[in-house]
Structures are given as structure tokens and as C-alpha cells.
Amino acid sequence: MLELLFRKKYFYPDEYKKTVFDVDFPSLKEKNIKNIFIDLDNTLIPYDIHKADKRTLELFDNLHKLGFAVFIVSNNKKERVKLFANMVKSRYVYSAQKPFKSGFRRALKKVGNPDPKTVCLIGDQFMTDVLGGKRMGFYVIVVDAIKRDSEKWYTKYNRRLEKKILKRLRRNDSDFYDRLNLQEKR
Ligand SMILES: [Mg+2]
């Protein structure tokens, strides 16, 4: 199974950035990206925080000004996702079941089913965000997790798989792995 996913390059993000604040959004516009799908937990806020801080509010203001359609796409429950999405004035998909396609399809439908190449997905996990986003044909940016110690058991499980994936990536395709230049210990 993993072998097949590897062969299809589903674990190859297009970019790595330390945080969402390091993403060069104007350059995404130049790449014809029109839709930004962002993971919530540990990409925008850690699991034990519910609200967006000032810097995050400014980031979303900026995204809206740049003209992106912005979606929070999260595997978490409605209450948490909705609260945050309303704060940053964005639409949302909860219980997205990443890496499966259903949640992404729900978001795509709401923006009129655009070409997947016009979508950039930003997230912190290889097993859910990178795999899910690449399966959809999105442009994928992986970021470091904000805070790991409050992660739930299933995320910890995914992290163990992630370790294997990265080990394999390093072994099978060291050029790509080096170019990615991951700074976080995963
Ligand atoms: Mg996450």
C-alpha cells in the first residue's frame, strides 16, 4: 500500500515552510492558485487553543484582500472548526476525513468545482494533508506542527507512519528530501 502511494508521489509536497506565516501567498497567485484550503489543528492553532490570535486574523485579512477563496478543511468537529472559521471570516469543512477525498470535494463544490490545480492545501501532516492533497491534485505546502505534545492518540499514530514515510523518502529520493529542507524533527 505504502509502496503504491510512494510510486505515485503522493507524499511529495510542493513546498515546505516553517509556519503558515512564511508562505509566499503573492507567489501562489502567480502560480494561478485561486483557492486556499488550510488545515486547522497544529497548522493554525494548537489543539489546546480555540481562538485565532491577532497575527492570524491579519493573515486571513490579507488572504481575502489578495482575492483567494479560503477554506478551513479540518478533520476535527464542527463546533471547534466553526468557531475558528467564523473568527477568520472563512468558510469551512469539518470532519473532513483527510486523507480521503470527501471533505475536499465538499469544499470544492462550494466554490464551483474549480480545477484542482488552482487549489493550494496547507497542512502539517504527511498522512492526512500531504497525502490527501496530492491525491486530489492540489498544490501542497507542508508546515511544521505548532505544538506536538497535545496531539491525540490517532495523530500520534499518524506521526509514527510519517516517520516511516520520511525515512523512506530520504532513502529513495535523497535529492528531493534534501531540497525539502525540513527543519522540524518529525
Ligand atoms: Mg493538522
Image (cartoon, rainbow, N blue to C red):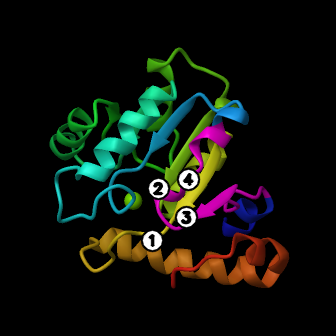
**Quick one: SS at disc 3?**
helix
- Give the residue type that dot 2 points to: Val
**Contact, CB < 8 Å: mark 1 with mark 3?**
yes
Which of disc 4 and disc 1 is earlier in sequence? 4
Which of disc 3 and disc 2 is earlier in sequence? 2
Nearer to me, 17 or 175: 17
x and y, in percent, of residue 157 in the image:
40, 75
Quadrant that contains the N terminus: bottom right
Real-space Cα distance between discs 1 and 4? 24 Å
User: Of tags 4 and 3, which is closer to the observer?
Assistant: 4
The residue at 51%/28% (across/down) is 68
Q: Say which residue label 4 marks.
A: 23
Q: Quadrant of ligand 1?
A: bottom left
Q: Say which residue label 3 marks.
A: 126
- Give the residue type that dot 3 points to: Phe
Where residue 20 is drawn, which disc sits there? 2
Real-space Cα distance between discs 2 and 3? 16 Å
**Contact, CB < 8 Å: mark 2 with mark 4?**
yes
User: Of tags 2 and 3, which is closer to the observer?
Assistant: 2
